Image (cartoon, rainbow, N blue to C red):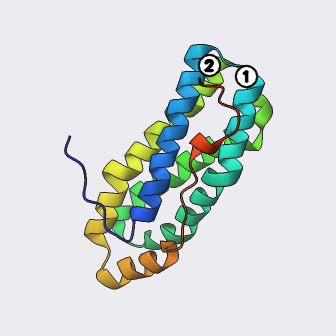
Amino acid sequence: MAPIKRSIELQPLSRQHHNGLFFCLLLEKGVKKQADKILMRDFCQYFWEKDLQHHFELEEKHLTTFSFYEELREGISRMMEEHVFIRKFFTNPDILNEYSIFDQLQQSVDKHIRFEERELFPLIQQIINQQEMQMLGLAFENETNNNCASYPIKFWE
């Protein structure tokens, strides 16, 4: 599959998605290695607090405003449903106590990111007008990308 040309306005979210995929890779490595589950749970909470929670809030605040476009309604609805599902792993971290649960989280986040990157974002770029894209660009221009590799405990090694 050829890389998708991301609009400059959505690139900050795509960079955050890249970090989310890195999170998935590290979690997958931890499961394969049978790493300490408490360390993995703590890593998941770190990722949620330093990255994913804010990312979800950004998308929910700014992308849902385009639900009035009929062509985007289904994709935005799916995005929101997946956010609710994924958020449950982090709002009750005690459930992160089995490798199968970490695996389910990793797969859910991976699938969600790939949906947004391959389906929702291209559709947004195609449907919304230039003025609306510029508004998104302003909303996302100061966004940072926190890298999971900076996490101090390398349970995945």
Q: Residue at x 44, y 68 (%)?
A: 67
Q: Amino acid at mark 1?
A: Lys
Residue 8, x across and y down, in percent: 34, 69
Q: Is residue 148 above or below residue 106?
A: below
User: Of marks 1 and 2, which one's residue comes earlier in the chain?
Assistant: 1
Q: Residue at x 57, y 69 (%)?
A: 61
Quick one: SS at disc 2? helix
Q: Amino acid at mark 2?
A: Ser
Which quadrant: the C terminus? top right
Q: Residue at x 36, y 51 (%)?
A: 117
- Residue 126's image quarter? bottom left
Relative depth, front residue between 5 and 64: 5
**Residue position for label 2:** 100
Q: Is residue 37 above or below residue 140?
A: above
Residue ranking furthest to the bottom? 131
Q: Across the whole image, how many numbered discs are drawn on residues?
A: 2
- Residue 90's image quarter? top right
Which quadrant: the N terminus? top left
Relative depth, front residue between 86 and 156: 156
Say left or right for 40 vs 3.
right
Residue 144, x across and y down, in percent: 55, 63
| Mark 1 vs 2: CB contact within 8 A | no
Residue 31, x across and y down, in percent: 59, 19
**Residue position for label 1:** 37
Neighbour tally class for label 2: few under 14, some 14-19, many 20 plus, Cα within 10 Å: few
Neighbour tally class for label 1: few under 14, some 14-19, many 20 plus, Cα within 10 Å: some
